[in-house]
Amino acid sequence: MCGIIAAVAKRDVADILLEGLQRLEYRGYDSAGIAIIDSEANFTRHRRLGKVQILADDVKEQNIKGGTGIAHTRWATHGVPSENNAHPHLSRQIALVHNGIIENHQALREDLIKKGYLFESETDTEVIAHLIDAEFERSGSLFDAVQTCIPKLKGSYAIVIFDITDPSRIIAARSGSPIVVGLGNGENFVASDQLALLHLTQRFMFLEEGDIAEITDKEIHVFNNLGDLVQREIQESNPEQDICEKGPFRHFMQKEIFEQPKALLNTIQGRLSETQVITPSFGTDAASIFSKIEHIQIVACGTSYNAGLTAKYWFESLSRVSCDVEIASEFRYRHFIARPNTLFLTLSQSGETADTLAALRLAKEKDFLCTMSICNVARSSLVRESDIVFLTHAGREIGVASTKAFTTQLIALLMLVTSIGKEKKHLDDKTELSIVQALHALPQHIEEALTFDKEIEKLAKNFTNKQHSLFLGRGALYPIAMEAALKLKEISYIHAEAYAAGELKHGPLALVDAQMPVVVIAPNNDLLDKLKSNIEEVRARGGELILFTDKTTAFQKDKNIKIIALPYVNELIAPIYFTVPMQLLAYHVALIKGTDVDQPRNLAKAVTVE
Ligand code: G6P
């Protein structure tokens, strides 16, 4: 989604800001803009539709100077992607960038129009600029104007503002969308994501909900939502962890697929002994909380939701605890009944997904036993606001299509299932041992799955001219078929639908013909015979079958059946293992289609608006 970077410095900052925007490209955007003033308050603003590079070329050509500036990548919410709607927005002396959505923008707009303001864009953001301008004109202090306007805004926002006649300071405010301040030497920076500033500093201060900060090149003053001056902790980043280069890979997504053995290893390290899952890795109170759990409510979006669906199979079969899984945007707007002793569990790569965060906040007001989040970003809002946190150590994920974050969520969930089952005395030592052994073996199995890359690349050619596809699975492999279909949709723009294989004859079979690739995830397990019947149903209708199976199943290839047979793995970890060839399939199809693999059209990495 939208990205922000800003600077107050003695040196020229145009290049710094543009590099920051490039680092934010992964979040998804459709236009970009920059506004800069020099020490004599000469002001310039540039906005362009499309890639940051187009804006950068423009800025370079104009040789823009100045040490104070704000820049933005916009992902359209209110108003089409266009230069006029791109940020920064201006109102007389005020220049402003904004992430988020102002829900009461219409009422505010009408009010401002009555006061004589003319609107140049269709955005909700321009409303904030005019609102602050009106107050600024009255009070003469930009900080006071921001402080007075903030309570009038309903919705979520991260904003950065400056007065285009005063290069000495910028003001940043957050509510619902993250803001981080980067501390330099005689210069300071602001961004919506730490990644945008890693080329500038390793020292960061994360603003909290309701904070407003006044930032000069030497000082940072933060005020909380009560208007009190507060200190926010300064944190050092870990340069090794924050590294974000593609290395020898063509795309971040490809790199992240191949990083999975390491990401999985990092996620289990120190949390598994040779024979057991170490329950205190979920927190010091985990054992006592887990023993009380009678139900689990999982809430998540996108790929994280698919991880939750997989975990439901594990929770109910291994830890014998009932589990519901719901999409956050649905959960937050329906009347739900919190069953007694329910663990409310959110799953999220970013920890900033607006709907998931809103669901957590809602849950905190209800009668849940405890809130927990499994998340990949340690400093995210979800992590800060959950009672118990379990971090996946996938490392930074840049590709919009989530890969290593998903498999590390799954391994974290399997550990959680085991721990809860054990603490509730529903899961015996022998079962725990077999899960733990399977988990230890998983990174090596994933390495083996990755060696099928070339074979899968060849197979991807079957999708060259296809518009639609079906993905089938049964049991815990059904959510993996959902994730596989989501991956293909996201990055190749081929319509892909996942079905529980048993549902085939209740509708989707009508779609099957020679133009319809039907991908089946078919490892050797208790449901294989049932799945074989479903495969025959497709075959009898001339469907083009692509089977992802293991070497023990003895499927026979023919001209309508393509087979990728991986080495057999313990069925407990098969959902995680079979995810990898599905990711490779989506990746290679996208390469054939020539799409923008890391930044697919219309999509964003962290969806910070609802
Ligand atoms: C966006 C991303 C997906 C992600 C989903 C949920 O749609 O493009 O890759 O699965 O948000 O994000 P979260 O960060 O909460 O896991």
Image (spheres, helix red, strand yellow):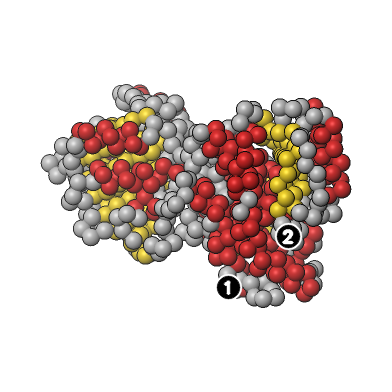
Kind of element beneath mark 2: loop
Nearer to us in this view, 340 or 425: 425
Which quarter of the figure is the C terminus placed in?
top right
Residue at (76%, 34%) from the top-left corner? 560
User: Mark 2 or mark 1: which is in front?
Assistant: 2
Q: Are marks 2 and 1 in contact (CB under 8 Å)?
A: no
In the image, 485: left or right of 587? right
- What amino acid type should be assigned to the residue bearing mark 2? Val
On screen, 200 above or below 541?
below
On screen, 97 above or below 85?
below
Residue at (60%, 47%) from the top-left corner? 454
Q: Is residue 453 visible?
A: yes
In the image, 520: left or right of 213? right
Residue at (58%, 73%) from the top-left corner? 270
Residue at (56%, 51%) from the top-left corner? 257
Which residue in the structure is indicated by mark 2? 569
- The numbered disc on residue 270 is 1
**Residue 518: image x %, image y %?**
73, 36
- What amino acid type should be assigned to the residue bearing mark 1? Gly
Whether the residue under disc 2 has CB within 8 Å of ligand 1: no
**Residue 548: image x %, image y %?**
72, 46
In the image, 147: left or right of 510? left
**Residue 536: image x %, image y %?**
85, 37
Question: In the orientation shown, which residue stands out farthest toward the left?
Answer: 40
Q: Mark 2 or mark 1, which has the lower sequence index?
A: 1
**Residue 136: image x %, image y %?**
26, 39
In the image, 183: left or right of 368? left
Question: In the orientation shown, which residue stands out farthest toward the front?
Answer: 558
On screen, 602 above or below 454?
above
Nearer to us in this view, 403 or 95: 403
Mark 1 crowd level (few <14, some 14–19, many ≥20, 10 Å Cα): few
On screen, 373 above or below 503?
below
